[in-house]
Amino acid sequence: MPSFTDISRLTVLAIAGLCLLVTATGLRADDISSCPLDFWVEKPKKPPRPAPGTPSTISADEVRAEGQEWVEFTGNVELRRGTERLTTEHLRYHKPTDTVEATGTVSFETAAKERFQTSSLKLRIEDEIGETGTARYSFGLIPARGEGRKIEFLGPGITRLHDVTYTTCPEGQDSWFLKARQLDIDKNEQLGRARGVRIDFMDVPIFYLPYMYFPIGNQRQSGALPPRIGHSSTFGSYLEIPYYLNLAPNYDDTFTPRYMTKRGLMLRNEFRYMTQNSEGSFSLEGLPRDQMANEERYAGYYHHQQKLDARWSTTIDLRGVSDKQYLADFGDHINITSQTHLPTNAELVYRGQRWIFTTRVLSFETIDTTIPVADKPYQRLPQLTLGLQPGGIKNGWQPHFDGEWVNFDRRNTTLTGLRTTARPALSYPLSKAWGHFIPKAGAHYTSYNLNNAPDPAPSLARGFASLDTGLAFVRDTSYWGRAYQQTLEPRLYYLYVPAKNQNHLPVFDTALADFNFDSLFRENRFTGGDRIGDANQLTLAVTSRFLDDRDGHERLRLSLGQIFYYADQTVSLPNGIGVDNRNDSDLVGDMILWLPSHWYMRLSAQYDPRSDRAQKESLTFQYQPDRRRIVNLGYRFVRDQVGQSDISVEWPIAGRWTARARTLYSFRDDRNLDSYLGAEYNACCWAARVYAYRRYDDTRGAVNGIHFEFQLAGLSKYGKVPESPLNQSLFSFPAPASAPKE
């Protein structure tokens, strides 16, 4: 196996090189996308064919009757029946059986765009039953082509080929062939069945199978799926062979044995179902004995979502693992291995015309052993919420309400209990094209019923008032030869919440909210229901937008704001968290840029003018000129806590080669947390991929792996590669999509 010692360095160098290619390469987007491997289109339930009773017409240079039953056609013979067409030099037609016998240079095209070239053909036209001699063929709807010693037509949509070659490669590209003693193509079931199979790749036999089947469309079929191979430092080399069971149109099952040289045999099963009003899945995997841990290990997941009627629905999510290290050992990327808690959730939801009611049971399994008991989340057994949806303005007044009743519980903790919260409010929104004016007033009520507390029933009521007002100014302008409408949107937000001592209240689910531009307009600087922050403050903010005159799309947004405090804050979490006794807050701002040249950028920053230092920065950057080319760059900084970069690239590099890479780097730790480097070769009818990864685990250090995948288009896929690095980012990149039109 190759060494992974320098994989992080190689990843960084590869990404740097790929970024240079963004401007240097001359490849066109359609060099690869013109022949995608996933070429299937939705097939009709039945293959197209002429309607029963469709008449046939035959033309030729000469026509001669042979008795009462036979007619002979010679020279430039053409038979048409609907969209079916047969041409040859010589044809005999038997009227009683509606059968034709063609010889010479025979070309036959069916309504399903099948084409056959042979020296002899016998066909009962209406029934579509017959056979050819040695023939070349192509199936236009699949698509596939090849040659056969004999081809039989067994009725509408069913073709049997003997001593056949079969490939999905285009003419002139004979990269691979399936060779079989017998091959049945059933377009009714969208299935190919082959016996006595040999697969040749580049004229080299690579597989021998007595029997195999493969899909020729989107319809699911039971059977063994292609094997998957790879290597990881945590479980060694592995081989897995999934078996798929199409049990019914609305449910299926996949059983996957997986042998790992370091761990032993893992068994995995996933059952999926769907009904008119529900869907769900159940998966269970485990090792009867992990050879490295010398114990039984397993993981399970259950998901169910159901619509009970027009207003009621339910969702259940159950997760569990046998031990704290399971995800670190068997997770395939950092988004899984970095999880600290596994949530289990069950909820019942009512959505009325104005009200939403939820009953929820939520618990957590903490799988990070370094987290102390005091920092583990409380279980919510149960949680009831009631909320009033926006709208319903009457005489200009807008009511607001959200309430909650929740029972908090946690193992090895004495302080547990019930909490009831209610937050009614009333606003009078006035909104026009030139601005808005929204006064609002309400109250926060919190009460508890606690166990093992000096005061078992503390409660607190607080009122609040706010005023949100803003203006919108618009002007016409132009930059770089383009016309824009620029807005200037100043905004004032005043919030008053009287200070009341809340130190006697417990802390079950409350934390200090993240401070960013959107939080300038929050009614509470805390999340959760245990603290309502006191406030006597005014937010000053301004936003400017640039709207493209041609299509109205927003191309640039600039926002900046700050809070000014008129009184010292007194409400805090334990250890004084959440109190800022300065006269003003840090400056926070956002910049979002969309350029017609396929660039996207977002920059968020928090700046402390007193120390002249940035407190937080977040940058996301994306360049995507087309579907197959994309560069993502992310950077996140929190003073004394976080300093990370996240870079991912997908880019065609030469011919049909595409490179993909990702690196997640921690500046504080001076190490790569997650690296991913791979390449793909796409030859239209086949592809090969290889990807190596290296991630850092707090308990094991570096974890390395390599995965392979080999795909024959329209036939099978061998091996498995991890999820695209573009989908694993810890930053909020826009989802990769087709490039926007200019």
Image (spheres, rainbow, N blue to C red):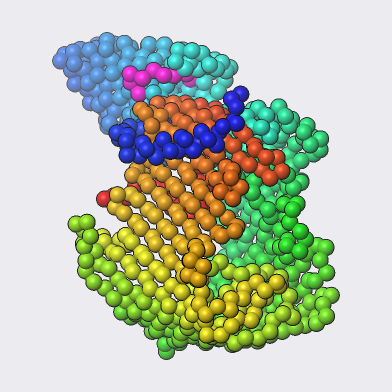
Residue at 71%, 35% in the rendered image: 267
155 and 143: which is toward the camera: 143
Residue at 65%, 64% in the rendered image: 347
Residue at 62%, 34% in the rendered image: 704
| Residue 448 sits in quarter | bottom right
Compared to residue 498, the image places residue 299 above or below, namely above
Residue 553 locus on image (x, y percent):
30, 61
Q: In the picture provided, is 308 more to the left or to the right than 458?
A: left
Which residues make up the magenta segment?
170-183
Instruction: Spot the residue most to the left.
Output: 61
Residue 324 locus on image (x, y percent):
74, 47
Compared to residue 507, the image places residue 319 above or below, namely above
547 and 281: which is toward the camera: 547
Is there any visible trace of residue 275 in the rendered image? no
**Which quadrant would the N terminus be assigned to in this image?**
top right
Tally of numbered tags? 0
| Residue 536 sits in quarter | bottom right
Q: In the picture provided, is 315 more to the left or to the right than 487?
A: right
